[in-house]
Amino acid sequence: MKKKLQSAFQSRQYMTSRDFELFYYDDRNLTKVEAHTHNYYEFCFFIEGDVSMQVGKDIYPLHFGDMMLIPPHSPHRAIIHSNTTPYRRFVFWISEEFCQQLELRSQYYTYIIRHVETCKNYLFHMDHLAFNSLQSKMIRLLEEMQADRFGKDVQIALYVDDLILRINRLVHEQIEPQKTEVDASLYSNLAEYIEEHLEEELSLEKLAEEFYVSKYHIAHVFKENIGLSIHQYITKKRLSLCQEAIRSDTNITEVYQAYGFGDYSSFYRAFKKEYGISPKEYRDMQVNLRPEKMDIHSDKL
């Protein structure tokens, strides 16, 4: 590791940057770290040292390739058992506001954060290849942060995105193989429940309460299984039933109220977006297609 990339140990527990901060530490005389909390997410990528990490009451011995994610307001501290070997690690801080911005862009950026907050699992182990790929990305980012190059800010933003997405992908690959069958069952049960309750409120929050899983996981399961958000899926199901009911001569007002659309304007927009015509135009088209409305003559058959 290049000496110039090394950071002096920061005892402050607040960020001076709005979005993120990245440090490489090589501490040889660090003896005690007090338990503390902070209002940002802290990733610790452990390289070397005789160290454990305490989060709450749980203590995790650290080994090369370990990555820990400490959420905001979670008491934690490093326990230094010995200074025989240096305590080397990367530390990556991300603000809550920045995480919210990332999630608005894509939930792929915050998969690990939602997993940690739901499962309270703070420790992830990477094999040498995966961990070295993360180290490479962090070194590249540190070098860019210290350089004075054309387009520096744009390049830094790209490197940060790349690092965060890589972290989430590695964790997803660890977790998902164990959850494939469970998620398939969850998706099947959710789809069946939705089918039977289309006339009721079907918010993510309601489904999360019903199935005892996080709303983020439900959203992820649907996106993975059918490539649609759960909102899109429910809307398509409801519109299909509305279309059927309109064909059966049910009053349009009764139709949208019966299948979970809060008002006509939202029903109108959704229907036209899905089928390219308004509900009234669709109803009129169905009326005109009925045999009694068509001028059919036997000599033309």
Image (cartoon, rainbow, N blue to C red):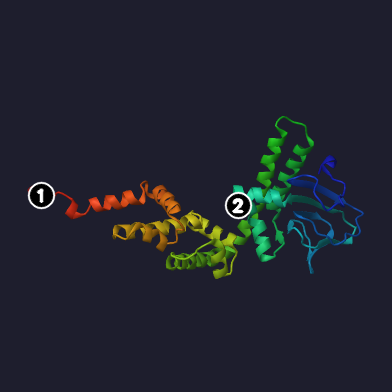
| Callout in the foreground (1, 2) | 1
Q: Secondary structure at mark 2?
A: helix
Q: Is residue 165 visible?
A: no
Secondary structure under tag 1 reads loop
Contact (Cβ within 8 Å) of mark 1 with mark 2: no
Residue 38 horizontal/vertical position (percent) = 79, 56
Which one is in front, 160 or 289? 289
Q: Is residue 96 left or right of residue 292?
A: right
Position of residue 106 relative to residue 193, above or below, is above
Residue 44 in the image, given as x and y percentages of width and height: 77, 54
As drawn, the residue found furthest toward the top would be: 150
Q: Nearer the viewer, residue 244 or 222?
A: 244
Query: Residue sitting at 45 percent across and 52 percent down?
Result: 266
State the image coordinates of residue 280 (x, y, percent, origin top left): 33, 51
Residue matched to label 1: 297
- For the point 90% across and 55% down, which residue is it? 30
Q: Would you name the residue on which mark 2 appears? A: 108
Q: Residues within 10 Å of mark 1 (few under 14, many from 20)?
A: few
- Real-space CA distance between mark 1 and mark 2, rounded to the nearest whole angstrom: 60 Å
Give whichever of 152, 214 is nearer the camera.
214
**x, y percent for residue 257:** 41, 61
Please state which amino acid type lies under the numbered disc 2: Tyr
Horizontal side, residue 264 vs residue 161: left or right: left
Mark 2 surroundings within 10 Å by alpha-carbon count, few (fewer than 14), some (14 through 19), many (20 or more): some
Amino acid type for the residue under numbered disc 1: His
